Every structure is written in C-alpha cells, then in structure tokens.
Image (cartoon, rainbow, N blue to C red):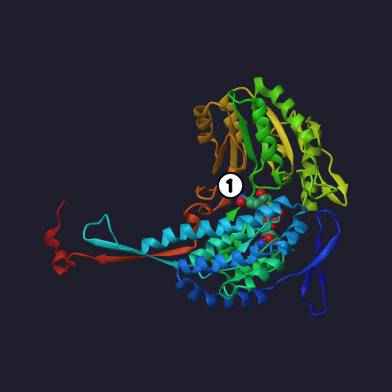
Amino acid sequence: MSSTQNSDAQRQLPVRNPRTGIADHTIDVCNDAEMAGIVSTLRNHQPEWAAAGIAHRRKVLRSWIEHLYADKTLLLEALAADTGRRLLATTEINALQALVEGWCYLGEQVFEESVERPSATPGIGIKSHYIPNQVVGVISPWNFPLLLSTIDSIAALAAGCAVVIKPSEVTPRFVEPLAASINAIPELRDVMKLVTGDGETGQAMINHVDTICFTGSVATGQRVAKACAANFIPAYLELGGKDPAVVLPSADPGHAATIVLRASVQATGQACQSLERVYVHAPLFDQFINELVARAENAQLNYPDINKGQLGPLIFDKQAEIIADHLSDAVAKGATILCGGTIENHGGLWLRPTVVTNVTHDMKLMTEETFGPVIPVMPYETLDEAIALANDSDFGLSASVIGEDLEEAEFVARRIDVGAISINDGGLTTEVFDAGKNAFKLSGLGESRMGRSGITRFLRQKALLFRKDPAKGLDSLDESQAEI
Ligand code: NAD
C-alpha cells in the first residue's frame, strides 16, 4: 500500500475495496504528536470514569448501544464495504450489545471483591482494591474489523480504563460511523477514541499508552512485544493459528464433513480459529473426502450479488498472494487439488472452498497460516499419530475433535497443545464468551482475553491488609523466642 501526502503534510493511505479491487477511500495516518495529544486527553478523563463505578459505566455503555442500534445503516454499509460481506458485518454489529452486557456483568463480579474477607493467615482481613490502568491501546486486524476493535476495548472500559483504538488500515471505513456513535454519548467520547493509520500509528500508540492489546500476525506481534518491553508496558497478544481438526474413528464422515467445511470456510477462511488442516482416521478417509468435496462444490460466492452465497471476497490482496503461494508450493510437492484452487479475479478476489489431498508437513499449506478457504486433508492410522500431527506446529491457538465417542474425543482434546478445543464443532471460541483460554506457542502471549481475566488483566491489584487482633510489639523480635 503506497502512501501519499496532502498539502498539510498529513500522511494519507489509499484503501482498496475488496469487491472491486479499486482504491476508493483514503485515511489519514495519525502520527506520534497527534497520538500524544489524544492519549493525554484520555488520561485526564480516565480518573472520573474509573471513580464513577461499574454500574455507571454500564449505564453509559448501554446508552451508546441504544443510540448505535437506533440506526445501524451507516455502520453496516461501511463495514460491508470494508469486508465485502453483509451477514458477518451484521453479526459483528449485533455482537456489541452482548460484549457490553457480558463484560459489565463480569466487571460487577470482580469489583464486588472490594468487600473485606478473612485471610487464610489468622487475624488478618483482606480487601482487594483494583486500580485500572489509565489508557489501554487496542491494535486490531482486518478480518473482523469491528469485533476485534471492540472486544478488548469494551472490557477495558468496563474495568475503568480509557481506550484508544487503531483498526487495520486495510478495513478502516467503519471508523467514521463508529466514532460518530461514540461522540454522541458525552461521557463515552472522553474515554473512547478511534484513530486511523498503519504501523507508524501502532508504534506511536505503544509510545504513549499504559497497556497494549494487539490482535494480528505473529511477525507484527513480535515487533509489538519488543516495543512494549522497551517501554515496560504489558502487551496482550492474540496472534495467528494453524488450527487442526482430528476426525476420530468413531466419527460419522458426513457429519464430520459438514462441520469441517463450515469451520474452514466461514469468513472465507479469514479467521484466526479457522480449521486449516484436517487429520482423518484412514478407514474413513475416502468417504470423508467424497462427502467434503460434494458439500464444498455446493458453496457459492457472494459475487456478483452480495446478498447471495456463503463466501465473501478475500479482503486483503496480499493475503491472496500468500494463499496462491501455499497452493502452488503444495502442488509442486505432490498435493492434489480436488475442488476450488483458483483465485478468481472479478476486480475483487474470490476463492471457492478448496479441498487438497496428498499433503505432507513439508508443505507451507500444512505448517504456515494460509487464512483462506483451503482444506488440506491427511489420513492417520493411530490416535497417537493424529495427536503428534496436530501438535507438529509452531502455533497453538485452537483445534477441533470430531467423533461419537466422547471419552475418546476428550482423551485426544486434552493432548492437543492449544488453548481451546471445540468438540463436535469448530471455532466455538467465537460463540463462547466466558471460557478462559490462553494462546499457546506462537499464537499469543499474556492472560486470557476471555473469562474473568478479560477484565482483571486491565486492573492493578492493591491489597489492603487489616490486622484484626493486636499487632505484635518488640517482644516478638526477641532472640530468646527462637525455636526449631
Ligand atoms: P498484521 O499483524 O499485519 O496487522 C495487525 C495490526 O497491526 C494492524 O492494525 C496494523 O496496522 C498494525 N501494525 C502493523 N505494523 C505495526 C507495528 N510495527 N507496530 C504496531 N502495530 C502495527 O495482521 P493482519 O494481517 O491485519 O491480521 C491477520 C492476522 O491476525 C492473522 O495472522 C490472524 O490469525 C490474526 N488474528 C488473530 C486473532 C486472535 O484472536 N488470535 C483474531 C483475528 C486475527
């Protein structure tokens, strides 16, 4: 993406439309000086927001959702233009209410702990006092632009922090209508700001905020972690994945194919928790492949009509190049493409569900994140082999295990080295809000984004310790009391 200059020397970036391939939008790049000003203003308003309490914060956040939902049109149109899809844009917008309710509910539970309780040490009472980090910076990717800009932000706001959000420069159209909805709520606009820009803006954010929540690629995540370490601020990183699915001996091949197809091609495979490699018990392999290909061939693109079909465009043209590279590398090393496989250029780029066999772990398709609707499938003989294959990865985000025998499914799930496993489904982490999970290996760093720690990671904990019985005097230090 090339940058341009305007007369005010504000750096600008062109934005490509994923359905037409044409750059039809421009954003300003927020620079370090502007970021310093924004964070300073947020810092000034945050103490009042924190002091107002969780019940008040919930009221303000609810009034924002009410205002936003009164007319979703502009936000929906912008998000649909960013991503080239409508159903998921609607889903992202509708998820905001659940985020507000969920995080405020958890926030209430956490702040209840300010009530005094007895310590395990006799004669001491404890009160936990939570002090929110002042300004949390959120840096988000292009695949679910609204959801991944707000999931951590709303938690941080519920915790009492102020938030500055930098969505991806690939999908920034939704920023304007979302910012307008925030600005309509006076108490919220002082503690929640959106900025546009690229890596420069991300680095500027790291220079000024107190905590970073980053969702994106491993390579950028590592850069972000280093910059945060240099500034001595925490970085919570949610990075890429190469999620495996294991189809057990007890699985019904047709049912397994239904699950695998949906969980691989949802959002055109542009989801961190997409299934990216499938291991099938060898006796089921042929039937599974037949069922999978038959279903895959039924899938339709949402082109030319955005209101039809199941697969939207590849949002980011650079990602399309990675997908094409993974496929050609696999074919050169002996893989067979059974359906799909060709990136269709209609201005925007689309790819139909692509089922690939004769794959090995020497191929990029089985080891690197592809981030497209590509389903490489490999047979295995024993459960030990399936577990070893699933664990043969630098990533450890999530996984899926499919089979009728739940004992066997749990046995396998417990041995796969990832943070979340869907049993008899795929990608359940997108639906479940209250299950804490860590990203293993290169898939992330820091406390769980979901569950209670989704709030507590933004709070510094101060222990107020009350001596209940008489405090000790000098006599307690007397050497004569030494006993073995
Ligand atoms: P990316 O790493 O290229 O960019 C992510 C964000 O980082 C963007 O906003 C970008 O502007 C910003 N950025 C770029 N350089 C930066 C720098 N030097 N300092 C600070 N910020 C910088 O990722 P992407 O291509 O936008 O997103 C796709 C990736 O995100 C995939 O790997 C996917 O798996 C991952 N992802 C992970 C999760 C999760 O929850 N684990 C969810 C969605 C996406």
Q: Is residue 216 shown left or right of residue 114?
A: right
Q: Residue furthest left?
A: 480
**Could one spot residue 231 in this view of the protein?**
no
Mark count: 1
241 or 479, which is in the foreground?
241
Residue 254 location (% of width, % of height): 67, 27
Is 348 situated above or below 13? above
Is 360 situated above or below 324? above
The structure residue drawn at horizontal position 53% and vertical position 34%, both measured from the top left corner, is 413
Residue 141 location (% of width, % of height): 68, 56
Q: Dot 1: few (<14), some (14–19), or many (≥20) neighbours within 10 Å? A: few
> Mark 1 = which residue?
431
Q: Residue furthest front?
A: 70
Q: Is residue 189 shown left or right of residue 464?
A: right
Residue 211 location (% of width, % of height): 54, 65
Residue 99 location (% of width, % of height): 56, 57
> Looking at the figure, which quarter contains the N terminus?
bottom right
The image quarter in which residue 31 lies: bottom right
Q: Which amino acid is tagged 1?
A: Glu
